[in-house]
Amino acid sequence: MTRYSELIAAVRRGEKILIDGATGSEMERRGIPEHDNGWYGAAALTHPQILRSVHAEYIEMGSQLVVSNTFATHRSVLRDAGAEADFEPLNRLSVQLAREARENGERPNVVVGASVSHWSFSGDNPSLDDLERGAREQMAIMADAGAELIVLEMMVSIDRMHRLLAAAHSTDLPVWVGLSVGDEEGMLPDPAVMTLRDFDEPLGEAIDSLNGAGVDLLSIMHTDVDLVDACLDVAFERWDGPLGVYAHSWRGIDPADYAVRAKGWLDRGVSVIGGCCGTLPEHVAALSKNPSLTFR
C-alpha cells in the first residue's frame, strides 16, 4: 500500500489522524516578508531552510500529513504578485521541501499533500477557464515533484471549487476539499445562515455538490474556532464521507484550549484534526501530547 492509501484506510476504519498546522502565518511569525498580493507563496525560493524546518517541526510533533506551501502559488496569484516567472520553480520546490522534511526525519510514512486554492489576494479573480487551466498546470508540476494528495483549500465559491476539482481529477492523485465559512473574526453576513466566505453561498449547497464527486475527505478549514460546531451540524447531515477540521484563530487561542475544542470535534465523529492561520506549532504539539486524544 502507498502512504496515502494506508492513511485513508485508517480514516475509514475510524482511526483519528493528526495533520499539520499553519504554514503561511508561521512564515509571518518567523519574520519572512510578505509578498504583495501573494501572501507567503514565495517562501520556497526566498527562505527554503525556514520553510523546510516548519514542515519538519510538524512531523516531529506527530503530524501524519504535511501540506506544501502552495496555497498562494496558482499562476493567477503569482501574476498579481509580479512573480509569474517563478510559477514552476515555486510549485516544484515547495513540494520538494515538504518531502525533504519527511525524508530527513524519522517518520517515513508521513503523507505529503499539495495545497491548491482559488483565493485571490488582489480581488482580481481570473475567469473560470483561466482558473482551471492554471490549476491543471500547477497540479501537474506538484504531482511530478512527488505530491501524494491534492488538498483544495479555502473553497469559498461552488463554481470555482468545481473547476479546481476537475483539474485535480486530471491527475492520478486523490483529493481532499476544505471549505471556509465566515470572515477572519468568525462573523457571518446573516448569523442564522452558514455561508461560504465572501461569495455567501450556502455551506449546505457546497457540501451537497461534493457528494459523489470523487472527494475522499471534506474539511472545515480556515474557519474561526467559534463557527466550527455550527459548520459540523450542517456537514454531518449532508456529507457521506469522513470529515476533518483545521480551524483558524486570528484572535489567538491558548494551545490547551484548542486541544479541548479539538476533542469535542473528534468526539462528534471528526476523523482528521490540524490547525490553520493563527495556530502555531505549539497548538499541534498540544493536540499530540493531550492524553485524552488518541491518534493513529
Image (spheres, rainbow, N blue to C red):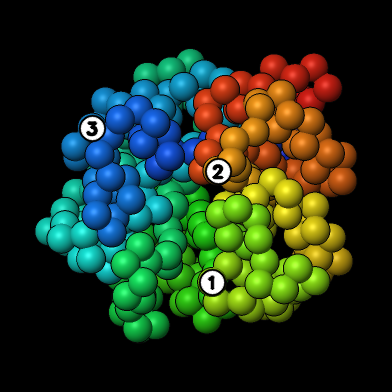
Q: Is residue 227 left or right of residue 1?
A: right
- Residue picked out by circle 2: 250
Question: Looking at the picture, which amino acid does disc 2 mark?
Answer: Trp
Q: Is residue 11 left or right of residue 264?
A: left
Q: Residue at x 65, y 61 (%)?
A: 187
Q: Mark 2 or mark 1, which is nearer the start of the sequence?
A: 1
> For residue 47, which numbered disc appears in the image?
3
Nearest the eye: 41 or 102: 41
Q: Position of residue 51 (x, y in %)?
A: 33, 32
Label 3: few (<14), some or many (≥20) within 10 Å? Answer: few
Q: Is residue 216 left or right of residue 191?
A: left
Label 1: few (<14), some or many (≥20) within 10 Å? Answer: some
Question: Looking at the picture, which amino acid does disc 1 mark?
Answer: Asp
Nearest the eye: 293 or 26: 26
Q: Mark 3 or mark 2, which is nearer the start of the sequence?
A: 3
Describe the element under mark 1 as helix, strand or loop: loop
Q: Position of residue 196 (x, y in %)?
A: 62, 69
Q: Residue at x 54, y 71 (%)?
A: 198
Question: Where's the N terminus, which quadrant?
Answer: top right
> For residue 254, which numbered disc appears in the image?
none
Question: Looking at the picture, which amino acid does disc 3 mark?
Answer: His
Question: Where's the C terminus, which quadrant?
Answer: top right
Examine the image and state in which quarter residue 77 appears.
bottom left
* Extreme residue in the left direction: 85
Q: Position of residue 52 (x, y in %)?
A: 34, 28
- Residue picked out by circle 1: 198
Q: Is residue 212 left or right of residue 250?
A: right
Task: Tell me, yes or no, whether the two marked residues, 1 and 2, touch with CB atoms within 8 Å.
Answer: no
Nearest the eye: 13 or 165: 165
Residue 106 visible here: yes
